[in-house]
Image: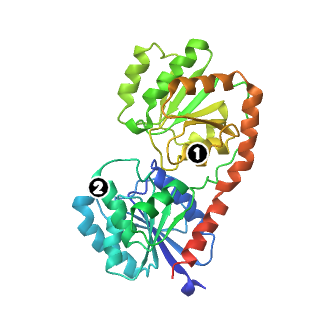
Amino acid sequence: MEGNKKNIAFLVGRVSIKGGISRVASIITDELCKNELYNIHVISYHPAEQGGYNWNSNIIFHNLLTERKSMKKGIFTASINLNNVIKTHNINILVATGHIVGPLCSIVKIFSNIKLVYWSHSSFFGESHFSKSFNEKFTSFIANQVVTLTKADMINYLRHTKAKHVENIYNPIDSRLTNDYSYDTTSKKLISVGRLSKSKQFDLLIDVAELIFKKNDDFILDIYGTGECELELKNKIKKLNLSNRIFLKGHVTDIYSKYHNYSLLIMTSEYEGFPMSLLEGMANNLPLISFDVPTGPNEIIKDHINGRLIKPFEIENMAKAIFDLMQNPEKRKKLSNANKVLIKDFSAENITKKWISLFKGLK
């Protein structure tokens, strides 16, 4: 059987202890390792970090570079090394995870017989810079298959690129992370999770929280994540005298174990690809509240069923929706219960079946 196995490789920017792409890739590859049809390889452009997510011990790892370099400076060496990995290990299918590594995979694809899958990991229109747009359009043109995180982006790729085949496959929730906690209707704590960057708009979340606290100062808001806006957010919290109500908790490796302490999960992003924090909140039965930005939230949140979708970027309406829910534990409990059913659509087992079907269809 070993000789008949297909060799599938996932190329990531870096096998990391923090990155969302690494997290999702670790879930998918773990499930694929259970299938006797495949040998799974994970290739890291930058040298891999020690530790990280629970990568399956059967995965074969490769590094393309010995030190960190920008893609512009490292792409020549990396392309040679990637081509060697493909030939040495007889890689049949190469999955490019994200637009940064897309052109590198495309260059190698042009000079080899591999099948290339471009797995988009960000909103097509989310970031407005030339390199991202070029990378996505170039890679989707070269690739045999494009995989998008949302149905909305599937349409965007079909309309705005020359991709041959486009399919939507959602990110999965990690089946290895489970808990037995019941939803706590008495909790007065709100949670938000994400990189402290401009696009996540935590400054708006602080404005929302200020409006809520004016009505009721019993609530607490915890924000998990790190990023370039951390000092700016700290200063804003201090300026508004909310240091005893809003807490920047930083990065934690066990975020999944924290969710059960909270009553609601809130997202105020300007745009999203496919927000894993919403999915994790759903898996932990938290009611979800987000601005209804074009891709992501409205494919996880069903308005008034398992959470609330608020018109971007109406902070007064978001504050009102949060306050109303906090005053109505029975309503929150109903939203929580709905997640127990909806989360099944995002199980790792079901999502991996779609990947296997896609691989089989690559002729």
Q: Position of residue 266 (x, y in %)?
A: 56, 33
Relative to residue 121, is residue 191 depicted above or below? Answer: above
| Residue type at numbered disc 1 | Asn
- Left or right: 324 as drawn, with respect to 133: right
Relative to residue 295, is residue 65 depicted above or below? Answer: below
* Residue 101 in view, yes or no: no
Closest to the observer: 43 or 66? 43
- Left or right: 295 as drawn, with respect to 161: right
Q: Position of residue 17 (x, y in %)?
A: 46, 49
Relative to residue 155, is residue 225 depicted above or below? Answer: above
Q: Nearer the viewer, mark 2 or mark 1?
A: 1
Distance from disc 2 to disc 1, alpha carbons, whole Å, reads: 27 Å
Among the 4 quarters of the image, the one containing residue 257:
top right
**At numbered mark 2, what does the secondary structure look like: helix, strand or loop?**
helix
Mark sitting on residue 298: 1
Tell me which residue sits at (56%, 36%) in the image.
290
**At numbered mark 1, what does the secondary structure look like: helix, strand or loop?**
helix
Tell me which residue sits at (45%, 31%) in the image.
202
* Residue 125 in view, yes or no: yes
| Residue type at numbered disc 2 | Ser
Residue under numbered circle 2: 131
Closest to the observer: 296 or 282? 296
Tell me which residue sits at (45%, 12%) in the image.
241
Q: Residue furthest left?
A: 73
Q: Position of residue 225 (x, y in %)?
A: 46, 36
Relative to residue 213, is residue 263 depicted above or below? Answer: below
Please tell me how crowded label 2 is: few (under 14), some (14-19), or many (20+) other residues with Cα within 10 Å. Answer: few
